[in-house]
Image (cartoon, helix red, strand yellow):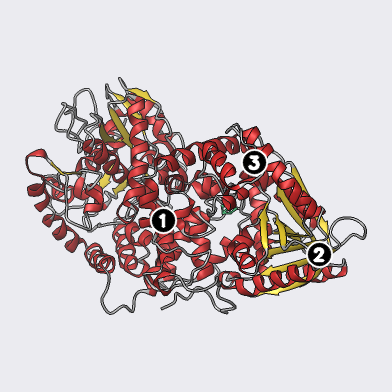
Amino acid sequence: MTTFLGIPRRSRPSGHGMGHNGLPDSPLRGHTSFPDAARSAVGNTQLRRNLGNATATIRAKRAAVVGELDDWEALRDAGSAVKQQVMARLPELLEQLEAQVTARGGVVHWAADADEANRIVAGLVENSLQPGDAREAVKVKSMATQEIGLNEYLEERGIEAFETDLAELIVQLGGDTPSHILVPAIHRNRSEIREIFLREMPDAPADLSDEPRRLAMAAREHLRRKFLSAKVAISGANFAIAETGTLAVVESEGNGRMCLTLPETLITVMGIEKLLPTFADLEVFLQLLPRSSTGERMNPYTSLWTGVTPGDGPQNFHLVLLDNGRTNALADEVGRAALHCIRCSACLNVCPVYERAGGHAYGSVYPGPIGAVLTPQLTGIDGHDDPNASLPYASSLCGACFDACPVKIDIPSLLVELRGRVVDADRDRTIPGGWDAAMRAASWVMSSGKRFTAAEKAMKAGRVLAGKKHKISSLPPPLSAWTTSRDLPEPPRQTFHQRWRAEHGSSDDAPAPGGEPR
Amino acid sequence: MRIALLATCLADAMFPDVAAATVTLLQRLGHQVVFPQAQTCCGQMHVNTGYFAEALPIVRHHVQTFEAAGVDAIVAPSGSCVGSVRHQHAMIARKGGDDGLAAAATDLSARTYELSELLVDVLGITDSAAQLGSYFPHRVTYHPTCHSLRMLRVGEKPLQLLSTVQGIDLVELPGADQCCGFGGTFALKNPDVSTAMLADKMAGIIASRAEVCSAGDSSCLMHIGGGLSRMRVGVRTVHLAEILAATKESAPAANPASTTATGNVGAAR
Ligand code: SF4
């Protein structure tokens, strides 16, 4: 049973092969539900410290630079309005982008899903290599290529893709998966990074220390060689300007700029939602993005390129426009807001659930609050056993993400909306689950005053359970989920309803208070 | 004013002293209090768990019950339940195809206030000791619950009320704006993460060296207090309404529905 999340089912995101549970083994779907995956993450003390320190640092930086701007709220409104406009006019803007990129010497490819995108990119890489060239490509950090599992796909075809973003390199060398959309190695500390470099980087100096500068220098040495030899670069894009056909990558290290300028061929894979209508819109987003993501006023490197410039930079430019479930999300009036996301990661950094569970628990390359709404929309939900069915519940709905989001995505409301769909998708089950039965019963009780007061009487039984200690410290499952870490107080002798009735009988009105109002 | 009490199902069933303290405060200010006895629950648990269809009859019952009360204002000692009334009721009605109910729910929500909002914005309380007679000689820290903070934006109102209580030693809570990990059914569906969040909240409370942790929501207090009790921390939880309702005259009665079994200092009944 598949949850129906939109009207025109354009494409289903795909990965390669099938994983456990008969579900597709995709970068957008893990093997375990969030609560189960989070259970082991919460017990990992090293992870808890690494994440706690890193998110606290980024949170403080972001708060400081956001606090400097008097017009921050106006900027957020502007960002949100631009993105709404983009979603409303997406087909038209995409065609405009295609025309502009083509007119300036680029080639545009359309990919309905991950498989198609991977096939296109692999073909382009093959075509760019001469016999005798090393079968390799350098990569700019990109979520879109993570989402489609491009590195693995290329590897199966004997093409090595080298991640050049420092954190992404750490993840790649460690044989690991990213746990954060901006800082993919946020779950690692520097002594772990030193070990990974010594183990996996043949040119790492033997006396490498865990000093951040030394680590960065070792990576720099390692990467420089790749930049100079690689013929092909693969990137994502932060923005694409429909009006001019300009692509933009925003980064901190300059490694992206190396990839975007040195190789002969540049292949950019971009989700179709990354559009901005006009060049002037960058004014808004180049203020919103760095402050929200790294907590900087301006990021160190912003690279813009438009098609091909003869004699300067890559002479072959290919743009792969990726759908992979996005039109499904777009067709859904509520859910489409998730497509406004500019992947700044502010919502991850402020999320108390992410901070404790870490990114891997979400089972998707998009973790955290936005991942919990975006992932199930991109993949659809295949029944209640689908691990992605647990993602909309991976939130206490505290609302910190909504406050932090630079494009004002109301993530808590989206999560609630998706919870409704998870429940509705299960309604035709012949045997209702425990939650279904409990919620139906509670609805019946709580939609009548009489039934409610009658049910409250039954709670008296809790006083027996509480016994002499006047508290309840253990209950059978599923309520044991509460009592494993929390006591429950003894139910009171009288509920408030009973107390009121004892004092005022059947009257709803208390006698008018004596004395003068103060 | 004629003000209806929305006791909230949790306070009604488990923490009646919180509802009673709310009534006491309003009566002390000379207002006519109404308790529509047919009331049950705001339906938030159903909505937030995804059971929209099941929430609809609860929302309808709520709207009918409080419309019939004919009051100027409705007050609840809960930021979360007021948040649900304001941000979810009309949405649930619309989803259920009942536009009339949606309009009635919107109308009602405009008259529904969380306790600190009503006291500060509507009833003009600026000095709890002088205007309410509040007296609570204890070291207290305050946890701003997420829905009062981010859905209702009550801001400094509860702190303003607490800081003007006579005798109180109000101390800052480290990491105050961090969620305590309750989150309704989140506490049951994701018990491990919920508990990890609770652990950090408790660490902040302990660091504050307060003897009482207060908040505007019985639900979050039940969660925090349940953890403090389990760990024998020796800090109890007391709802904002109970602290404000406590006076010099009110005897240190029974433990004010504190979820911790430690200590025995009372607030007003
Ligand atoms: S949802 Fe908002 S805060 Fe989160 S990554 Fe996207 S843009 Fe940033």
Task: Give the left or right position of residue A504, taking residue A225 as reference.
Answer: left
* Circle 2/circle 1 CB separation < 8 Å: no
Q: Position of residue B40 (x, y in %)?
A: 25, 57
Q: Does the Cβ of the disc 2 residue fall within 8 Å of ligand 1?
A: no
Circles 3 and 1 on the same subunit: yes
Mark 2 lies on a secondary structure that is strand
For image coordinates 11% across by 45% down, the residue present is A466
Q: Amino acid at mark 3?
A: Ala
Q: Amino acid at mark 2?
A: Phe
In 3D space, how far apart are the residues under numbered discs 2 and 1 (Cα atoms)? 40 Å
* In front of the other: B55 or A54: A54
- Give the number of the mark in front: 3 or 1: 3
For disc 1, the neighbor class at 10 Å (few under 14, some 14 to 19, many from 20) is: many
Query: Image quadrant for the N terminus of chain A?
Result: bottom left
Q: Position of residue A393 (x, y in %)?
A: 40, 58
Task: Give the left or right position of residue A497, taking residue A48 as reference.
Answer: left
What chain letter is assigned to the residue under label 1?
A: A
- Quarter of image, res A308: bottom right
Query: Image quadrant for the C terminus of chain A?
Result: top left
Circles 2 and 3 on the same subunit: yes
Q: Amino acid at mark 1?
A: Ala
* In front of the other: B21 or A357: A357
Q: Position of residue A124 (x, y in %)?
A: 75, 70
Q: Identify the disc placed on residue A394.
A: 1
In this rendering, is residue A8 above or below A518? below
Residue B255 visible in image: yes
| Residue on which disc 3 sits | A204
* Circle 2/circle 3 CB separation < 8 Å: no
For image coordinates 73% across by 53% down, the residue present is A249
In 3D space, how far apart are the residues under numbered discs 3 and 1 (Cα atoms)? 40 Å
| Residue on which disc 2 sits | A317
